[in-house]
Image: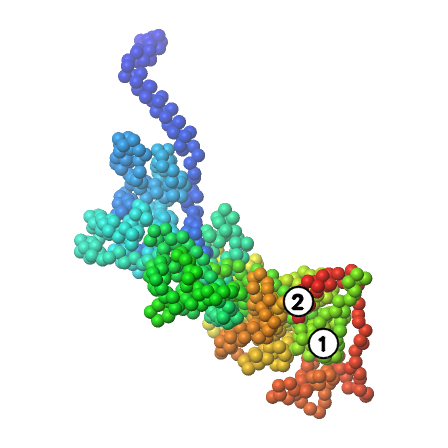
Amino acid sequence: MVSVASLRSVPARLWRRLPVRLLVYAAVLSVAALGGLWLLVARDLPSVDKLKAYQPPLPTNVRGIDGTPIYSYARERRVQLSFQEYPQLMIRAILAAEDKTFFEHHGLDYPGLVRAAYQGVVSGSTPRGTSTITQQVAKNLLVGNEVSYARKLREAILAWKIEDALTKEQILELYLNQIALGRNAFGVEAASHAYFDKELDELGLAQFAYLAILPKGPSNYEPFRHTERALERRNWVLGEMARNGFITPSQRDAARAEPIGAVTRRTPKFERVRGYFVEEVRRRLIQRFGETDRDGPYSVYAGGLWVRTSLDKRLQELAAEALRDGLLRYERGRGWSGPLGHADIIGDNWQGALLNTNISLDYSDWRPAIAITRAGDAWTIGFADGSTGTMPRWAAQVPMRGTSTPAFGSIKAGDVLAVAPSGTDYALRGVPRISGGFVVQEPATGRVLAMQGGFESSIQSFNRATQAQRQPGSTIKPIVYSAALEHGMTPASIIVDGPFCVYQGARLGQKCFRNFSGGGAGPHTMRWGIEQSRNLMTVRAAAQTGMGNVVRLMKNLQIGDYQPYLSYSLGAGETTVEKMVNAYGVLANHGRWHDSSVVDLVQDRDGKVIWPDQWRACNGCNMREWNGRAMPRPAPRGRQVLDAMSAYQMVHIAEGVIQRGTATALNDLGRPIFGKTGTNSGPTDVWFIGGTPQMVGGLYMGYDTPRSLGGYAQGGTLAVPIFKAFAKKAWEGMEVLPFRAPKGIRMVRIDRGSGRPVYGTWPGFEEFKPAVIWEAFKPQSEARRARRVATTAAPTAVPTARASQAPRDSEFLQRQGGIY
């Protein structure tokens, strides 16, 4: 029988043996090492569960009004595909190049790890390479790119966990969608567009093999700078594919005989429509959703949004062309305004210097070019595509602005120029210094169809259509008279076109308003006052209506929030083209307000509409055939900010501006048009706003730093021709529709001069200025037949304003010298 004492002595005897002690020490050290490894490496490892719901950063894709892709906002070019959408040859090429045993291992290549560790110890450097596709997913999405043994350990542990959490197909899908492949392309589909300008399923075996070499270092295999190195590596991938049975030897040999076939670096397909409209969409999206993924899941540069805009590409091109032509027409003969920019050329890299300026031109046949070298009487110039041309002295003889010195001698190497073909050479062109903004809108919805904020957005990024605060001049008058119509006046109300002064206090005395042409014409109808743009009549009508009522309507139309001073009735308050066009759209839409919008709707990456809020689809609106039931209608939007009859009366009056007033140049377009010209003090800006029931547009033209355009400049002579050039082409094929009168309007025959009702005769439609016209009245507001002749004389007393108002009007008038 074994005693207790003998049992207790067994551990002691074992401990005295050296092998036992060594085993115990090894076990303790192993436990300590594992504990330390866990504390230092594995304790705070990210969870692999988030890979199951991982959504890579995706660009925001923008479409036009017809659904055509027009732009893509992205810092990482990526097109997300499912595993089933990737061609099998592409997958095999990636496996041959990166991880041929991917479907056999559990995340780690143990022989490769041993080789890498041995090489690292021998060379004394940190091991590189040997990562499986699973390890690369762990590195790129979870642990980062730090070069260290600790990172490699974290990467290996995570790779093991990823293999337990995801299928091989899911891991490979993550890899193919997020890997960086150069040219700002992330993922294989985006790289297909970047290098070959094709969809992935349009590529061949040789092109698949080229894309498969890029994960090792895209810059090392750039197809034009390192062609031989890229071909060698591509052919190695093709050999590996054949060695692993992925392709046949004949397929390998045929693919090796092909060139790489890559295209030069170019703007992606979805970025070839640039301009002010696209930039305005971006600005509003960022304001709403943020810029990067730190701002939320729907950010512009990572959220993968799908944006439907109201941009009509045809109208946009016409608006841009009309405004640019008008600006150049005004600048003609004023000299060359200088280069578009300047870039320092280092060595022979003039192409890179030009590309880095991001300057582009899409006007006519103009191109941006960089001046490279001058040899005698000719400059060698270079273009963004790498080609060169010649600009001889005779092609740059236009004088510098304000001098008689030809431009040729003032050009320096590195100057970025606007040029156009002239025979076999190129001739110098000049971008105008004067600028302006143009907006076209659908009045029934408030959707902006076109927007041009200057000559060229890459040169002048400031959007004058939405950001330039300018005085609208006489284009504000229809708003002033709309307020008058709301408060008892009619289109036939008699208003005196005569002296109108405000008392400015004992020190300054009286200050009198004036008409553009000076003087006054006596009593006339409201209609005549608008058609002829009479300032004195406008100020008098505003005073009788009450400036508080006038500026309240301006605020409701979101033109501006002004104080109730008479100067604002003549366009003293600053506003934007977009706001003025939207206000005119309200007039054309029977006083119903819609927000001016450039975005119809925004969907997330899964197709759910996330903007506008509470968006509802119009069920049944797109039915192929009528089902016999009532027509489906979308829910009405907008709000009433102006009486529908008052709005129509003003539109009807503003048609007279086209027929007999300051915009008769538009009369030969042969359709109902309303509108108003505007010219402000100086004159520094000229305006026109108007349109048809289907389309309203407006523009201004002026220098960014306001200065006189010349005494001859008026809205009717400068702005109207620009609008006409646009409308003549834009309205081709558009149905000719009259402005529809709302319920309650009475059309009455009146004498155009006196405003009195007429009986026994009819309006002369063929006459330029008929004596009898149809006028729109609200019920019970039209003039009645009188038994005796009523006097048309108006009081001649000079009204005075409250002393508290006078200084503000006075200050403005003294500073501006009068508004017209």
Residue sitting at x 69%, y 79%: 528
Task: Using the numbered discs, state the Cα–Cα distance from disc 2 to disc 1 in whole angstroms.
Answer: 20 Å
Which percent across, then down, holds residue 690? 59, 73
Q: Give the amino acid type for the residue marked by disc 2 in the picture.
A: Gly
Q: Quadrant of the N terminus?
A: top left
Measured along the vertical axis of the image, is residue 734 above or below residue 242?
A: below
- Is residue 419 visible in the rendered image? The answer is yes
Q: Image quarter for residue 106? A: top left
- Dot 2: what SS? loop
Which percent across, then down, holds residue 46? 43, 38
* Dot 2 or dot 1, earlier in sequence: 1
Q: Give the amino acid type for the residue marked by disc 1 in the picture.
A: Gly
**Front-lying residue, 23 or 424:** 424
**Does residue 757 appear left or right of residue 580 in this picture?**
right
**Disc on res. 519:** 1
**Front-lying residue, 22 or 272:** 272
**Front-lying residue, 142 or 485:** 485
Q: Which residue is mark 2?
A: 571
> Of tags 2 and 1, which is closer to the observer?
1
Q: Image quarter for residue 578? A: bottom right
Measured along the vertical axis of the image, is residue 619 above or below residue 73?
A: below
10 Å neighbourhood of mark 2: few (<14), some, or many (≥20)? many
Residue sitting at x 49%, y 78%: 733
**Does residue 609 appear left or right of residue 740 in this picture?**
left
